[in-house]
Image: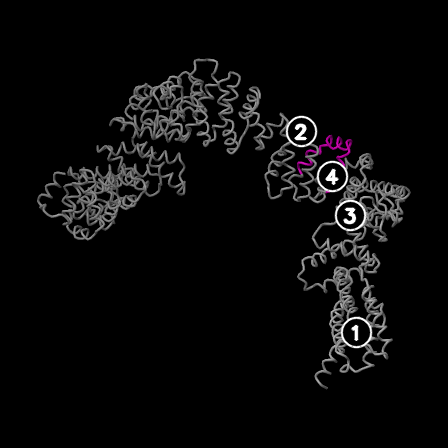
Amino acid sequence: MTSSSSQAAVPVDAINRALSDIVVADDHQYAWENARRFSGYAKRLQLLVNQILRSSPPEKLPASVQTALKGISGDLTQVSGTLAAYKRKSKIFVLIKSRELCASLQERTLAIGAWLALLASAVQDDDVSDLQKKMADLSRDMKQAQFRVTENEERVYSTLQKEGQGRQSSKAVQSAMVLDLARALGIDSNNYMALSNQVKLLRNDIGNSTSVSDRRILITLERIIDNWATKPDILTQKLDFDSEEEGAQILPFKNFLCPLTKEVMKDPVVLESAQTYERTAINYWFERCLEDGREPTCPLTGMVLKSLELKPNIGLAGSIDEWVNRNIEVQIKRAVECLSEDSSSVDSIERVLDNLYRVSEEHPMSRYRVRNAGIIFLILKLLKNSSKGVGSLLRSKALMVLFSMAQDHESKIIMLDEGITRSAIHSLIGSSEKEREFAVRLLLYFSNEEDFCIKMASEKGALVLLSSMADNLENPSLSHLAEEVLKRMEKLEQNVDHLAVAGRFEPLLKRLREGPDDVKIQMAYVVGRMTLTNTGKEQIACQGAKTFVELLSKPDGKAASLQALYNLSCFDDNATILIDSAVLPALTDILFENNVLSIESKALAAGIIANIVKNPGHWELASVDKEGHKLQSESIVTNLLGLLSLASPQCQLSILQILYRIASSPQASESVTDLIRSGDGIKTIIAFLEHPEVEHRIAAFRLTRVLSERLGDDIANALRTSDKLVMLEDKILDNQSKDGERSDAACILANLSLSGNEVKAIVGTSFVRWTVSTLKDQHGSTNGRTSRSNFGMAEGLLGILLHLCRSSDPQSVGIIKEHCLMTIFRDQLVFTSKAKVKRLAALGLRYLSECGMSLVAAGDSDLNPPQGFCSSFFFMCSRPPPAPSLCPIHATPCEEGSQLCLLKTNSIKPLIDILSDKDTTVQVAALEALSTLLLEKSTGLQLAVVELEHLGMVDAVVDLFIEARPGELQDKAIVMVNKMLRVESLVNRLSLNQSLVRALVDAFKYGSAITKSYAQVALTDLKQISGISTHASSQNRGQR
């Protein structure tokens, strides 16, 4: 075959293949009219093509004929693909693509008709005139062909496309869509399986589609078909009783159900198509039709409606009402039986409650029947009866019924009378969200009644639970409901107190800020008697302090405002807020006014000031009167002292507390103590040490302790004059007194300047024995944790022992040795963490070490005489002990445990340890104690330094000096360094310590005069400075 004949055969073969795919034996194999019509054209075309080929082989056909055949071939190939969709794709797919498929068929049919016209004109032979006429007829028919989408298909297409846009549809509209779809597919609308299969086929057809619209249509169809398949949710179908026994027809007739909602109709209406629907359901469908721009239709018949008139189906409505009423009576009767029986199962009760809720919601006119049957009482009894094991789900259903029935006024009254408030409040803490929701909904509904709001506010825990729920933003819906309940309650004056207790202060604060004076005073009384959290106190102080201060100037508001301010001042952080509101001048005016009738006001004013000054801070700089005086000024302190002996007991207590606080303030202590001394206040304050009231004594002892730190001589003289010095010892030993009193008494006695005879009289053997026992007991009973009062007692007792340690007379030394006081001081360094106690213990070790050195210098080598009364018998009845070894510190024999030797009591290591303490005073005290080991003129200095170097003291002192800044600590440390540098072996080692050298150079440059002098000598000894002879250096040492 030549190439020209081959080219002519190609379109003919393509035409035959396309026609074989298109033409079917039975046109009804195509489910769609458009496909069937084109199939008819294709059959005629097939006959014409066969007739042309019989008349002449393809290669001999004229060129114009071949051109026409090529054109027909191309269009038929495209039509074959379009008809394949009609034949093989799901019907729903064809509906979705109906416009596209129809347009494609229309376009290809017109094109083929044009090619046929060309083909007819190309055939001019008389032998084929009949063929030419047939071609012309087919061409004309195809050119005139009109492929259309039917009205029903168009409706379904439009609806599905709208659904593909993602809009929401009601149940009624979805049902109408299913009816339209089923009609367009030629499927019975009740044949769920067939509809479902079509949707499954659609999923296969568009499984790989990237079109968002197609996927939305698929999802929507799956959802509405599933909803359509759901059986009618008829209320009575869920009842668990025998309908014949009760005499009621439980299941409704089919015509009672709306075709769209599948529920029993409440307002049946008839269309012009004679079909009956629920009024609201069909209206929804009409609205959707108009929204889509299509004519409203009857969903069941598909008939286009000329009129949208809805005629009530009165006869059917009457039948439905009769059926509903019969069933409601049965349901109510069954509910009464179930709720009255103790043996009813939880499932039965829950079903009954569900049915009652539907009756109440769907048939409001029947609520009176539920009420008259006594069901409200039974449900309330169910909620109250905990023995039934009422779970959260059942409670939520019971509350749901009550909430619905509350729309009936008489039922609402019954609920209020029977205590619905408490039951609803109890459910606010239910385990299920549904229970909490209906509980708060009930409260919200009833909160329209003022009496109910007042009663609810008085219920224990109600407002706290509602406030907590309102603040819980994790559940916005419940939070909003609870907030609405609280807002309604806030409108009532009677609820302000209860709301404030629950932490809702805004109603109170609004009345306090904006109300008339009588309302402000009332609110002040409320704040004064409330028990508030610290957060509440701070919130009220921030917004109400200035108002309270303003009320202080009003005679009627003074008492209420003072009570409120006292309550707020109990929170320490409110001190600054109150001071900034200018409360102090107003309080001092009240406190110092000459009005004998204002005793209680003075006491409250003093109490507020005492609370404000509880901690150092803003008050130290604040003005407390019109003249601008500070609280620590002479006029104020003088007035406080003058008022102390004249005021009421409560006011006296507050004044003592004020004086204690301002005397303890770092900013005011010096001036206040001087004012108290010059104003003869010591005598007045001491009188309170024996006050009959415990709180007064505690306050007086605290104040006296603080004053004794600066006024020890004056207080000692005052106590001697009043013969109360021994009273302090009695107070310390009195087990019936408060720990605070006893520890303060000990500290006072420690701070006093006592004569030798007074020390012997007070700090005797028995007192020392008790003191030592007490200190040991504290270590043994606290397991390392010491209370504040124990710290105070230890501080005081150590201070008292220092009185004894300062004396070197034989009697005192005997007591020291007998009771092992050096060991006691050492243990305090080990067991305590308080800086002041450690400083006192180090000071005690210093005094005892100095005493030991003094005895050695005086030629008394017996540092360890026999201890106790029985020791003489021990020596008479036993062999003498071995001679003690030579002590490297004292250069004389010292027994182990010698109470005047730091080395033998193992006290050097604890002193070295506290050289690294964070408190400078402790470090200084430790240096002073250790310095007693290095005498200025000691023949055994070499031996002592070697021993101390072995114990680590040398390196510790050097490190301390290197780190020390100019000041007392540096001064003490450099003295120790100089003493140690007298030992040649140390000089060689320390000269290599460049950190020490740099520290000495810095001390020489920037230190005090004495420090510079010692630094110069040390640098010379370390051979870091030349030009100073060793002889001159030795002379300087001797002079120092």
Q: Is residue 692 left or right of residue 1015?
A: right
- Please identify, in this view, whether the residue under mark 3 or under mark 1 is nearer the observer: 1
Which amino acid does the dot numbered 3 rest on? Leu
**Which image quadrant: the C terminus?**
top left
Mark earlier in primary sequence (1, 4): 1
Q: Nearer the viewer, residue 844 or 36?
A: 36
Q: Which residue is mark 4?
A: 382
- Where residue 289 sits: x, y (%)? 78, 49
- Please identify, in this view, whether the residue under mark 3 or under mark 4 is nearer the observer: 3
Secondary structure of the residue carrying numbered label 3: helix
Q: Which residue is mark 3?
A: 290
Secondary structure of the residue carrying numbered label 1: helix
The range drawn in magenta is 397-426
Q: Which residue is mark 1?
A: 119
- Please identify, in this view, whether the residue under mark 3 or under mark 2 is nearer the observer: 3
Mark earlier in primary sequence (1, 2): 1
Cα–Cα span, label 4 and label 2: 22 Å
Answer few, some or many: residues within 10 Å of disc 2's Cα (few below 14, many 20 plus, some between 14 and 19). few
Label disc, if present, on residue 336 of the rendered structure? none
Q: Which residue is mark 2?
A: 455
- Where residue 571 sits: x, y (%)? 47, 31
Mark earlier in primary sequence (3, 1): 1
Mark earlier in primary sequence (3, 2): 3
Cα–Cα span, label 3 and label 4: 51 Å
Which amino acid does the dot numbered 1 rest on? Leu
Which amino acid does the dot numbered 2 rest on? Lys
- Where residue 38 sits: x, y (%)? 81, 67
